[in-house]
């Protein structure tokens, strides 16, 4: 992905996640709820277009594809027919907007009984409990709580201990 795209995503608080190819059907919300109905709606419009007989042919007799404008209209029409509630639920079932406290983990689709990752809920709980346990003392706690960062002029750049330079931000 281009650096400019990564930067744009960062600016709007979008986190990037690498998902192994065989796992997208479990963790990508559109794959869980809307791709199949979306494709069905677009295919239905394509079939109607094919049946309408408005297609043009090239000089060689080959049928021209639908125009970009027509395809965009199909996409917009299909998108308008998708239910917002289903999309919202799909994001929850894929853990994309659940609370980090674990209180909504029962909504994760692939962790439900009969799903491929049914044991995943317990494994996740075990891993998260390890993160909650303070195993090492924070050696920097005294420094970060001391207020040293706030004590100086936030617009000053220290080049030398004896020389301060003001920078306008």
Image: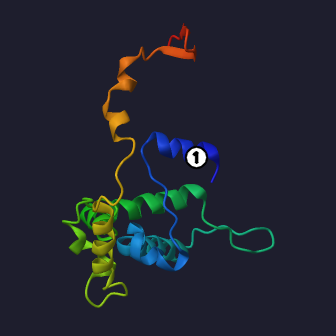
| Residue under numbered circle 1 | 5
Q: Is residue 41 above or below residue 162?
A: below
Please state the total of marks drawn on the protein image: 1
Residue 57 horizontal side relative to residue 12, left or right: right
Residue occupying the point 37% across, 87% down: 116
User: Can you give x and y, in whole percent of width and height, for residue 25 in the image?
Assistant: 44, 77
Residue 166 sits above or below residue 136 on the image: above
Percent across and percent down for residue 154 are 43, 17
Q: Of residues 156 and 71, which is closer to you in this image?
A: 156
Q: In which quarter of the image is residue 113?
A: bottom left
Q: How is the image coloured?
A: rainbow
- In this view, the residue in front, 158 or 68, is 158
Give whichever of 8, 99 is nearer the camera.
99
Instruction: Give the residue at x 27% y 61%.
Output: 98
On the image, which quarter does residue 79 sit in?
A: bottom left
Q: Residue furthest right?
A: 60
State the residue lying farthest toward the left.
Answer: 103
Q: Which residue lies at the image location 61% right of the left edge and 69% below the top edge?
A: 55
Q: In which quarter of the image is residue 53?
A: bottom right
> In the image, residue 93 lies at what x, y percent?
29, 71
């Amino acid at each position: 992905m281009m650096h400019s795209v990564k930067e744009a995503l960062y600016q709007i608080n979008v986190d990037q996640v690498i998902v192994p190819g065989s796992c997208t059907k479990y963790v990508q919300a559109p794959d869980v709820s809307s791709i199949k109905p979306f494709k069905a709606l677009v295919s239905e419009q394509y079939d109607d277009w094919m049946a309408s007989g408005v297609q043009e042919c090239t000089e060689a007799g080959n049928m021209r594809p639908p125009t970009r404008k027509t395809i965009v209209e199909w996409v917009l029409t299909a998108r308008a027919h998708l239910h917002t509630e289903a999309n919202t639920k799909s994001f929850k079932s894929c853990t994309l907007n659940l609370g980090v406290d674990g209180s909504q983990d029962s909504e994760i689709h692939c962790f439900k009984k009969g799903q491929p990752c049914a044991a995943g809920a317990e494994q996740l709980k075990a891993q998260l409990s390890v993160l909650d346990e303070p195993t090492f003392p924070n050696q920097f706690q005294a420094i970060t709580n001391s207020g040293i960062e706030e004590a100086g002029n936030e617009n000053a750049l220290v080049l030398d201990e004896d020389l301060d330079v003001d920078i306008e931000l």
